[in-house]
Amino acid sequence: MSCSVLHHVEVCVKDEAILDLLTHGFGFSHCARRVTQRASQWVLKSGGCVFVVTKRRDGEGVNENGSRKMNDACRNEREWKKGEEKSHTNGTAVDGEHWTVFCCRDSDSHTVDSVFNVALVVRNVDSVTEKVQAMGGRILRAPCDLTDSQGKVRYAIVTSCCGNIVHTLIDKAHYNGDFLPEFEPMDHACINGSGSTTSTVNGYHEHAQENEHSLHSDSNSDEPSRQHKIENEVDASQNPKHEDKVSPSPPLCTHVDHVTYVCRAGESRQLLDWYEQCFGMKRFFANGEETEADGFVLGGNIGLRLKAMEYWRCAETGLLSASGASMEDASLKLVIAEPLPDVSTSHVETFLRAHGGPGVQHIGLHTPTMAATVAFMAGRGVVFRKPPPVYYDEGVKLNEIEEAGHGSELSMFKDLGILLDTEADIFSEMEEEEGKKRYLMQVFTGPIFKQDTFFLEVIQRCGARGFGAGNITALAKSIILYNEQQQKLKA
């Protein structure tokens, strides 16, 4: 398994519904598994995109008198918390629970589904850990070594300065295994979630049958993720008719293009400074209208400010990318979305309320074949947001779509909700290569979880390095439209 600066992202969930979404819908392969007393974990991969799905194994039942009782797993959880400070000093994980950390780490039970761990490959685990601690971060796991037949990995787990986000810091210079020690490799043939026969109805999977190799053998979930049960007029026109235009052979997505955080108003400057000091990341301007102090501001009811930073493999300190990684895969891009003061209706404010504070709002997955990939995913039940119909009209985006050479695909773009943007890219004034426009295409899913928090983006870059300023406006409008229609359905 090749890895770049970003080793993996970790999702902490109440149930495993996201497994079917990522494997059946997005074409990820299930490549490793880990089960301990405190957690069940699945490793899913598409190209260089690696997700670890973690489910806390809450071990509490109910006594005959109605009081809560504690089994060994829950008791170990309590004992782990008591011994956590000791583990900070000697690097020893309590009860052998290396790697285990939860998004709701200060709670005895799961409280909110969240993408919370951005695991990074670093040059020197100890040095980066010291920098994080000096900048106010907590050490959840002190640096320590893990070995197996494939070699040695040194790692630590630290908190960030943004909400519940943590970073597992990993040095794999002396490790030849596919993923990490203690994770058991899985048969790559099992790529579609549970391996059961599935059908897709309005964006969620109904299992026709279960087989003995189900990934969900320890599931006690009683509610599918929000992405799987959304039914609304915005997405009702989604149609699998384009599915046959793409091969289902993975990977559909080649690498993580960017990770977007949402912070509270006024906190973006602090985040930029923290990541520069701890990891050597640098601010970069992705839009011609951006300023050093204010970033890129979208006013009105959109109400947000964007700032971006990245880390290149040519840097001398902090993070480390694999020598074989592509230029795109070797650059870790973090985007910070900050609400503007006194704008309570923005979608970033909605995230902060539903998530209970700052965190990872979305992740952009890069594909080299935008229309075909999105058609395949939509045909598999992935629900994508649609921009307002006027988006594709003349004088809005029609001219850009035609000039980029996609005029013949306009109908498909409308059906799938694909957005295209050439304006507001700071590099758009550079000379066009071979007469080609610099642009990007992107599409955004609906909420992945029950709460209106995290979503995924599929993006294809065609020379552009920005993030589609015009499309962000369309996204914000589609979210407002979505929320209005959800209210009508509830009425």
Image (cartoon, rainbow, N blue to C red):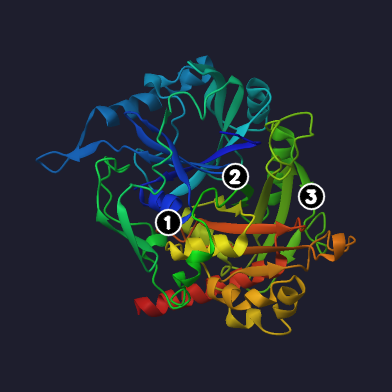
The vertical placement of 418 against 251, above or below, is below
Q: Nearer the viewer, residue 398 or 232?
A: 398
Residue 183 vs residue 348, the one in the foreground = 183
Look at the image and tell me whether residue 349 can be seen. Answer: no
Q: Find residue 371 and report its horizontal and vertical position in percent.
A: 59, 65
Residue drawn at the location 45% of the way across and 33% of the way down: 101
> Are circles 1 and 3 on residues that touch, CB within 8 Å?
no
Q: Which residue is mark 3?
A: 284
Residue 381: give x, y in percent of width and height. Answer: 42, 63
Q: Neighbour class for label 2 at 10 Å: few (<14), some, many (≥20)?
A: many
**Dividing the picture into quarters, in which one does residue 326 lie?**
top right
Q: Secondary structure at mark 2?
A: loop
Q: Which residue is mark 1?
A: 449
Q: Amino acid at mark 2?
A: Cys
Q: Is residue 23 above or below residue 5?
A: below
Q: Residue at x 51, y 21 (%)?
A: 88
